[in-house]
Image (cartoon, rainbow, N blue to C red):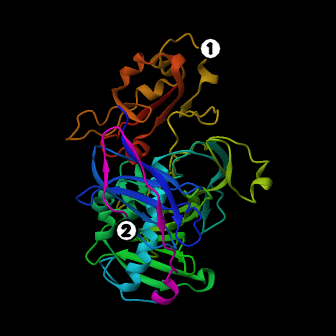
Amino acid sequence: MPAQAVRGQLTDSISRSPIAGAFLTLVDAQGAERARAITNSAGAFTLSAPAAGTYRIRSKRIGFKPYVSGPLALVAGETVSFDAAVDPIPVPLEQVVVAGDRQCDVEAGASVAALWEEVKEALAAVAWTSKAPGYWYEVTQFEREVFTQDNRQGLDSTWRNAGFYEVPFRSAAAEQLESDGFVVVDQEGWSYYEPDAEVLLSAPFLRTHCFESKVGKGDTDGLVGLAFSPARGRKLPEITGTLWVDRHSGELRHLEFKYVRLPQGLNAPNAGGRVAFMRVPTGAWMVRDWIIRMPIAETGRTPTGQATFLRTAGYRERGGTALEVKTTAGAVVYRSSALDTMQNVAVAPPPLLPPPVPAAAPETPAPPTAPAVSTAATTPAIDPTRPSTPSRSRDVLLPDEFEASPARDAFGVVQQYRPQWLRSRGRTSFQDADAGLVQLYVNGSRWGEIERLREIPITEVIEIRYRSGQEATMRYGNNHAGGVVEVRMR
């Protein structure tokens, strides 16, 4: 049965031109959000309601007055036409935003509230775009190790990827970050999490951080910032940072952040990252480039040799830049000037990372554990219906590798080419006795035990991928310590 929906166009009330990139929500009689959309380049939108009933449309676009429609009665299975004209208004940030007081309620202070009003619309649009993949990305990514104490040579790799990406990195769930912090230590090492748009918008993040406005200087001249820091009493590993906004247009430009209160008293002042945002002509908001900088720690001794401590020997950096973005129809919506200079960089999957090297153990007492860097926070999320770039990665199986296999099902192919995937095990959970076993996901949905690979005809498979316990936990949440085998089917 067809869904009930509202279809229409949003225009400027003065110029009568269409408004692209306006973020719209459909709210029910209780004010709860039931659907969301972004207007396209023609100002058009479609909002589908989950059930028949009375709804209102809310819209917000930087530079325009917030709009709320009158009540709209939606009958089951019918589509209602609704056009709206929105009044343009000047963005008041230049006059309103000055260095203000620290507010632990984002709506409390005038300057903080004005900034948050603009920032949250852009973040909501980024989050919405990430859940509705429809853009083809070509990106260049890098991973390198930079040592500060000596001339040691570390990892230094660059590669290119192409595919229908949702977001270039994904954080942990906001509730997990609230309870565990942004740096988590377990038997597999140290995991660093970046804040994505969903996290920054979440209630857990807002209630665990305080905010204040800043005026940009130097590299941020012409921008105003919404700075955040952990609320008083917060003792977990955390982040502090600033969301920078153009003071004239009100558009979100970039996020910069640092890790604070690192475990075991590690001092790493340069640990953190940066995320740059952009809005493409279709109105969608995207991440243009990103970097995360994670400490490489080692054990040191005091001059007397009587005590040990953990020190930062360098940093592992991982990030990337969008070179070109296209719609599903092939229209280019963004092209970096760097693309022409990147033709000699091969399009390939990420290089395999060497296992972390533990710090040399002193005699006694035992030193603090030197952290092994997790790169799960920057793992791309790929549309399950699209194949990745062909590869020979030990973590990916593609048809060009297994098409000659006599196996008829996915289990047989994995058993033939990647048998280690079937034997991986992780920590168990009191809540889930199967948490330490390898789990199976098909097109993004959990199927259960790995044995169910036998039910999948190999002729229907686009890609099979293995994710370690760390990656699987970051992507799917707790109780995935045994890893996940992902199957993408036609």
From the viewer's perspective, is residue 307 above or below residue 125? below
From the viewer's perspective, is residue 115 above or below residue 10? below
| Disc with the residue nearer the chain's start (1 vs 2) | 2
- The number of numbered discs placed on residues in the rendered structure image is 2
Q: Position of residue 228 (x, y in %)?
A: 40, 76
> In the drawing, what numbered circle is on residue 430?
none
Which amino acid, by three-letter code, is at mark 2? Glu
Q: CA distance from mark 1 to mark 2?
A: 50 Å
**Image quadrant where residue 12 sits:** bottom right
Q: Is residue 438 visible?
A: no
Q: Nearer the viewer, residue 324 or 177?
A: 324
Q: Position of residue 394 (x, y in %)?
A: 56, 33
Q: Position of residue 213 (x, y in %)?
A: 44, 83
Q: Residue at x 66, y 64 (%)?
A: 151
Specify few, some or many for label 1: CA neighbours under 10 Å numbering under 14, 14-19, or 20 or more: few
Q: Position of residue 164 (x, y in %)?
A: 58, 42
Residue hosting label 2? 238
**Image quadrant where residue 335 sits:** bottom right
From the viewer's perspective, is residue 289 above or below residue 93? above
Residue hosting label 1? 404
Quarter that holds the N terminus: top left
Q: Residue furthest left?
A: 430
Q: Is 76 covered by the magenta stretch?
A: yes
Q: Is 452 covered by the magenta stretch?
A: no
Residues drawn in magenta: 69-96
Which amino acid, by three-letter code, is at mark 1? Ala
